[in-house]
Each structure stands twice: as C-alpha cells, then as structure tokens.
Amino acid sequence: MSGFAGNDSLLEMFLFETSQNLEQLEQIILITEEAGGFSEESVQEIFRIMHTIKGSAAMMSFEDISKLAHRMEDLFFIIRENPAVSYSSSEISDLVLACMDCLHRELQGIRAGETAGSDDCRRMIERVELLHASMKSQADGASAPKDASQTPATPSDAQQQGAKSSSDYQFEVKLSFEPDCGMENIRAFSVVQELAPLCSTLTHDPSALLESDTASEQIRGKGFTLHATTHLNRDELLKHLNQTALLKDLEVKEKAAAKEVVKETQNQAKATQKADISVDEYRFQPQSMISVNVAKLDSLMDLMGEAIIAETMVTESPDLPKTPMPDFRKATARLKRIMLEMQDTVMSLRLVPLSGTFQRMHRIVRDMGRKLDKQIELKVSGEETEVDKNIIEHLSDPLIHMIRNSIDHGIESKEERAQAGKPPHGTIRIDAQSAGGDVIITVSDDGRGLNREKILKKARQSGLVNRPEEDMSDREVYNMIFLPGFSTRENVTEFSGRGVGMDVVVQNLVSVGGTVAVDSQPGQGMITTIKIPLTIAIIDGMNVAVGDAKYTIPTSAIRETFRPTKDQIFTDTEGNEMVWLRGECLSAHRMYQLWGIPTKVTELTDGILVLIEQDGKRRCFLVDALLGRQQVVVKRLPAYVKRGNRLAHAAGCTLLGDGSISLILDVPWLAGAEI
C-alpha cells in the first residue's frame, strides 16, 4: 500500500484529513456553480486543498492520488495566474467532482486494505492532463511574453528559483505541537508542504523530517524552526500557519529587508552598538479545539452511564429511609446535581450539527436533476441543529432515498410544470428543528404529490390491503410507500422501480428509535416528517411494575397516568375494552396479558393506566404501580435474547438502582402493534 502502511495512526490521520478536504472541495464547487463561475477566493481555496492532498498522499507513497491532486493543482494554477484564459466553469466543475468521486473510491479501497492506485484514477489523470494542456496552450498564446522573465512561474518553478524579490519578507518561525499528539515529524512535514509553494526560499530545523528516526523527538524537545523568504506579509503567513492541526505554540519573527537594515545602520553609525534587526513577534494562543477519536467518546459515554447507575444505586438505596443521615442526604443531592451537569457535558461532546449530512444532499440533487433533465433547487434550514453522532450516521441513507423519491416521483418535468402553472424549476426543502428531547426533520417538495388511487392499486396487486379501503385514512395509504418491495414505478430505471429504497428509511430510523410519516396534497407536493431522539444513550424513563416484572417507559411518550373509575370503562361493538377520558375514547390494554405475567392486579380500576402517544396514536396500558421517574442508561439487548422476535416490544434494557433489570419498552411498537 505505502511505506507507512504499518503506522495505523498515521494512515487514519491521512484518511480523515483527506476526506475532510474532499467534503470542503465539494461544497466549494457546488457554491461556485450557483454563483456561475470561480471567484478568486474559491480558486485559491481549491488550489490549497489540492496542494494539501498532493503533499500528504506523496508522504504516504500513494502516488496515483498525489499525481491526480497535482494535476488538478496545475489546472487551477493556470486559472489563478491567467485570468484572461477562457474556460467552461461547468466543464471544470464536472471534472473536479468526477476527480473527487475517484479519490473517494481510492480512500474506500485503502480503508478496505486494498492497494492504492487504479485504472480509474489513471484515466482521471489523463482527462485532467488533456484539459490542462488545452488551457496552457491558450494561456501561452494569450500572454506572448517578450522575455522569459515575464512568464508566470509554476509552483515547482517558484521553489527552484532560489532568488528573492527586494519586496519579499523574511521570517523566522518557531512552533510546537500539543503534547502526546504523536507523529510530530509528519505534522512538521505538512507545514513545509503548505508553505513551500509560497516561499522563494525555505529551510527548516530539523532538516531531515521523514528520513530521520529522531526528528519527532527533536521537535518534541526543541520545537520546529523554519526560515522563510516569501511575498506574504505576517498576517497572510499566520493565516496559513494557523491551519495546522494540534498546534500549541507559534512564534513568528519578521526580519527587516536587507535594504532597510543597511539604511538603518548608516543612520546610526555613531551609536555604540550595531542596530538590531527589527523584530515583530506574534505569540500563538493554544488551540481551543482538538480532535478526539470517536472510540474514546464512546468509552466516556459508557463510563458516564455506569456512573449514573452507581449514583442511582446509592441515592435510591432501600436502606436510606431506615437511617436518618441529614448530612449524607445533602451530599447525595449535590452529587446528583454534579452528575446531571457531567451528563450534559459528556452528551454534548457527542453532538454534531446536521450541516454535514445536509450538505451532501446538494450533490444528489445536482447530479440526479441533470440526468433527469429537471431544474431543481434545494433549500436547507436548521442545519445547525445538533444530534448524537451515533444517530446522525443513520440519517444519510434515509435522506438520500427521500430526496431521490422527490426528484424521480414528485418533481414534474418542465413541460408538466408549465401546464400546471408552476415555475420551471422545482423546489425541495429540508428543515430541521429541536423539539424537547427530539429532533424533527422535514423533507418537502412542490411536485405532483402522492396518488392515493395509484398507491392502493399497487397495494392490492401486492396483497398489502387487509381491510376496507374506505376505512383507511390518507396518511395510512401514503405510509404504504415505506413497505418493503413497494414501488409504483412500472419500469425499472436507474433510480427506482426495484422496490428497494423507502423501506430503508423506516429500517434505519427505527433502529435509532425514530419514526417517519408522510402527508401529501395532490398537485401541490408532499412532505415527509422524521422524528428522531437527540440521543439514544441516556433517556428519561418512568419505571412501572407488572407483577414481579419491571418495565421502563420513555417519559417523552407518556401523556398522562390515572386510575380509572367504573363509569369510564366500557366495551365497543367488537368487544374491545375502552376508556372514556375527557371526551375521547381510548383503547385499554392489560400489560400482564400481553406477556403472560402473573399478577394480582387484573382489573382496570385496581391499577394505574398509562396513556402513551406516538405519531398521533394514543393507547392506555394497565400497570400495577408507578415506581418513579429517573434517568436510565439504555443497554442493547444481547443477540440471543432478541432471536425469535420474542421481545419485539423491548427497545433495550437498563439496570435500576436496586440492581434489578428493567426492559425499556419500544413505544412505536406499543402504539402501532396489533394487540
């Protein structure tokens, strides 16, 4: 693979940083397309990204990746240095995105242990070289320099010139990295790679960064020193240096140009001491952000969960009421407050904004719209909303399928939209907002909407309709599109017709405790609503007793608990027990009957009814008693326990303060199951 294949941490850093750079590159290209061309800032940023990827890939001996990035860098060097050169920004955008996809595939192969480099990558290099040659020929013809000194230097030329302009600045840079960051020589090499194209001369100590086994140790002990001559002023140089990851200290000394030193010395000839070179010093403040491996955050969350369980076992101990200990109770109250603050802090470490996930949808809309010849605008709001990282990883596929469904089935062709009196371009919106302990995401479009009759016809053909159609609400009919194998497309296309897709939305969301619902207005569009918990690691729960068994119901789903009277209880025409509560008829179910649990509380009037609500569905469940509300740590059920679907009603389990185990009930199952 590479000369560094054995260094897993180095490889992990390369893969992470390159992936981040590619995501940033995609965002720049898509913004550039909307703006109608490349700005000076976007060209410079793309040039920087390609230069960074080129250097880090070369360091890892991934030659094809480095070469492709180098060719892209050359392409944007021409654009940057020759503004008069004409080119198709659309063609270059397509080429850059194709190169980006190729690099993503290369990274996936490296992660899978495959050898870097492929025919696909080499073909992309040839495509870039072909366009580069055409643009370079145009640039050479347009400039027609009278002598060689007027020809712009390429990045490699600049490094070989060695001569400096009288207007260049001279700097001495000293920097150090965060303790225990590791691979200091590689990080220093990255700094050199970043600055080299910007300097006419550049030396550094240690000089042998990759060849020496002691370079990292020297940098840890004495820091890393660079001497640079560059056209950049101090602020511009600092802008580049501040992009260095895990930087602890940075000191930049600016030395006066040679002419200024001579002049100053002559003017102070009578002075007893020789004039010193002026120094402008900048002290870098320690970085306020660091990168942390996700595995460490997972471990921290697990430890936090165990601490909460231990705290509950202490504060809820059955021995406490027997012993009057006022000071101890004050201490436990303070402990509880501290634990809550710690929990909030630890959980916030795992929260990431939805912006990264939403940003990837722009590419889906762009590519699919072009292939289907549809003009589509994607509007996004609420991307700053934060969600647990474990949950956000399950959001990408559902959003992709919903966006593709809107483009393929919802948004009409230009001709259809014109006939319907709609603007030629369709609109898809993604909105996100926090709602208590949940996050609600809506995906809407202004297309043709869902066709109830068409969905029912397909459902009848597939044997999915099991009750009178006139009794089914529009939402029930529309939600059939989430059933496995369901598709209204008659012909198989690149994007739909295989019956695979929308059921993935439900599967991914249910796996993290989420729900999905769809509404539609014929001719006006459809809206899909996703509801997901902010986190699935720790929840607020109400512990209940059913016989000798204990269950935990998420408090977010509980609307009310009450003890019914005989006057409130009646039976409907089908023999189902119902409860009348403030003008509403609610179905009542005995939990002990659902799971065959022996109990003395068998009548509705003897126990407590817990009213739960999920997606507009409300049901009452009989329990023996309420044991109290507390925060619980959600533990996954072992595979052997879930085997056979015997515990479909359980979303997980938790350890209570008295050491007993409680099953956490799956509210969507309770609200929607046929029981």
Image (cartoon, rainbow, N blue to C red):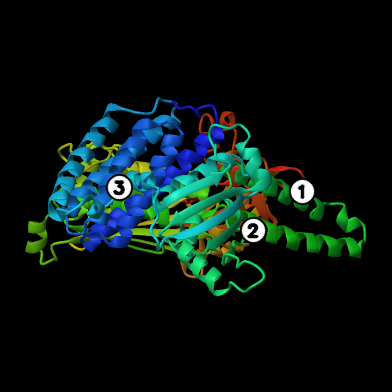
> 17 or 556, which is in the foreground?
17
Kindly state the secondary structure of the residue where label 1 is placed: helix
Residue plotted at (37% across, 44% down): 160
Residue plotted at (85% across, 65% down): 330
Marks 3 and 1 close (CB-CB < 8 Å): no
Instruction: Examine the image and state in which quarter residue 663 appears.
Output: top right
**2 vs 1, front mark:** 2
Q: Is residue 84 visible?
A: yes
Q: Which residue is mark 3?
A: 154
Badge 3, how many Cα within 10 Å: few under 14, some, many 20+? some
Instruction: Examine the image and state in which quarter residue 1 appears.
Output: top left
Side of 624 where 73 appears, left or right: left
Q: Position of residue 550 (x, y in %)?
A: 67, 46
Separation of residues labelled 3 and 1 (CA atoms): 64 Å
Q: Which residue is mark 2?
A: 345
Check disc 2 and give the amino acid type: Thr
Marks 2 and 1 close (CB-CB < 8 Å): no
Q: Which residue is mark 1?
A: 310
Check disc 1 and give the amino acid type: Ala
Separation of residues labelled 2 and 1 (CA atoms): 18 Å
Q: Position of residue 133 (x, y in %)?
A: 18, 42
Separation of residues labelled 2 and 3 (CA atoms): 49 Å
> 277 or 599, which is in the foreground?
277
Q: Position of residue 410 (x, y in %)?
A: 21, 54
Name which of mark 2 and mark 3 comes first in the sequence: 3
Side of 643 where 64 appears, left or right: left
Q: Residue furthest right?
A: 324
Q: Residue furthest front?
A: 270
